[in-house]
Structure formats: structure tokens, C-alpha cells
Image: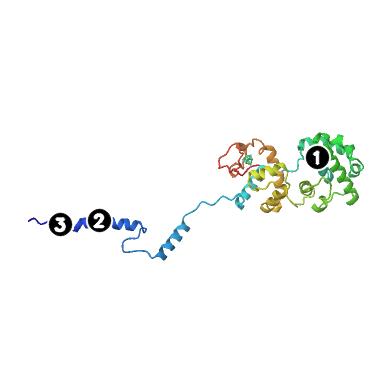
Amino acid sequence: MRTPSPAKTAPKGPTANAAERRKTAVHGASRGSSPPGEERAPKDRKKLAAVSKAATPRAKAYDPLAPDRIAEILKRLDQLYPDVTCALTHTSAWELLVATILSAQSTDVNVNRVTPELFRKYPTIEAFAALTPEQLEPDVRSTGFFRNKSKSVVGAAKKIVADFGGQVPRNMQDLLTLPGVARKTANVVLGSWFKIAEGVVVDTHVHRISRRLELTTQDDPQKIEQDLMRIIPREKWILFSHQIIWHGRRLCIARKPKCVDCSLENLCHAADKTWSTVAMHKNAKA
Ligand code: SF4
């Protein structure tokens, strides 16, 4: 009778060791890389996991309002438009007020064609206050919406003469009592003439570009202004609106913005960019 070979009986010797190693590897893999005999206590494993999580650099979530992003936008605007001012021709607060009223739904170029002759014909606030709106209409017709604009200009002149001693008020509250004057016009006069930063001018360019740059998601000019006032330092309010208005005229035009020439390009994720090196965000639209 032959004695069975050791291999066909119990797994002993080298075969037993290999089986044991396989068992240990599978077992070890399910518990991490602790060497056999050095099982980590659950507490240690938790600690290790926390340390490793903290050490792993995680991509920061994109925040369009991050202070460093806002600072970079302002820096580049300063480089692009270091000393821009209001493009409406004027020599007094009153002339700027009239020009701003006339600029609604019109272009500054168009308004600048009309105002020199207008101010020559009616050189003082009192001269405007003595008119009826109908008398002024032919002079401002080419700026569009001329009936409403005539009413606003003559109404504002009458009120300034009657209530403010013939002087354009230099505060928001009084300016807002003038016919045809809302925050945009008041901010233009306060900022550009009196150098008082009471708010941010939100015209059509500021409206469009603030949304493209994700500085706001609002659509209402007053809410956009509030958002901008929160993120732009006050000492920049006046210049910022001039810069954005110039940017809107030169490059960030409403249709087909010239993104390839824009130095804000890699900070801008606007959905309607015409050229981009960065991801475009579908909600970042004018
Ligand atoms: S990259 Fe294009 S859309 Fe963005 S700010 Fe510049 S011109 Fe405007």
C-alpha cells in the first residue's frame, strides 16, 4: 500500500504558505495597507483619513465675487482706461444734467451733436425754466423720445429755480425730486461733476458687462447698483463706471464683443463670448 504524497493531504509546507499569503493579501486590501499583525484601531484610521484629506490639495470652488478676482478686474481696467471721464460734453452741473437726461436711449455722440447749440440758445437754467416743453421739443428731437425728454428738462429747470435757488442740488435725495431724474442720472451728476461717490452709475453698458463678468445676476438697475456697491471699493465707484462704459463702447459691445482683443478675457466666462480660453458659463449673460 502506497503512502499518499504529502501534497495530496493537508496543505502544508510551501503550498500552505502561498494560500495563506493570498488570504492575507485579500484580507489586507480590504483593510488598507497595514502590515499583518499591525491592525490599526478604528480611531487611528479616522485620524489618518482626516490628515490625508487635509493634505490633499482640492480645487477651489469658483467664486465670481472672490476678492482677488474683483481686484484683478479692477487692476486690468485701470491699465486699460487709466483716466477716463464722462463722454458727455458739458461745462456745468446743469449742462451735465441736461445731457444725461437726453442720453437715455441715445448715444453720447448723438447728444454731443445737439447740446452745444442748445446751451448757446438757452444759456442758463432760468432760460430753460421759462420754456414750455413744446418749445424745447424741436431742439432735442434728434435724441429720440423728445416729448418726454423736453418735459423732464423743462420740469427740472423749473423745480431747480423754484426749490433750490437756481443751483443743481448736490445730494441724491434732492436730485431724485427732479422730474426725469432717477439714480443713474443723479449718480452721473454727483460723481462726474461734484466728485461725490454716492452710488455706481448703471447704464446700459454697466448693466450688460457686470452681468457678463458675473459681478451680478440681477437685471434691475437698482439691484445691480447695490451688488456693485457691495463688491467695488467706494473710492472706485466713480472711475469704475466710466471704465466699464468705455469698455462697453470699445470692446465689450452688445453684439459680438471683441473678446480676442480684451485683456479681461481669461477672467470672463460670459456665455456670449466670441472667443474664449476659459470655460463659458451659461448663466453669465448680458
Ligand atoms: S472677454 Fe468679451 S465678453 Fe468678456 S469682458 Fe471682454 S469683450 Fe466682454
Amino acid carrying label 1: it is: Leu
Amino acid carrying label 2: it is: Ala
Residue 149, percent from left and from top: 83, 40
Residue 121, percent from left and from top: 89, 37
Left or right: where does residue 84 sit relative to residue 121? left
Q: Which mark is residue 70?
A: none
Residue picked out by circle 1: 102
> Colour mode?
rainbow
Residue at the front extreme, as displayed: 1
Residue picked out by circle 3: 6
Q: Mark 3 or mark 1: which comes first in sequence?
A: 3
- Residue at 87% in and 45% down: 155
Q: Mark 1 or mark 2: which comes first in sequence?
A: 2
The vertical placement of 52 against 81, above or below, is below
Q: Are marks 3 and 1 in contact (CB under 8 Å)?
A: no
SS for dot 3: helix
Which sits in the foreground, 16 or 121?
16
Q: Quadrant of ligand 1?
A: top right
Q: Residues within 10 Å of mark 1 (few under 14, many from 20)?
A: many
Residue picked out by circle 2: 19
Residue 38, percent from left and from top: 33, 64
SS for dot 2: helix
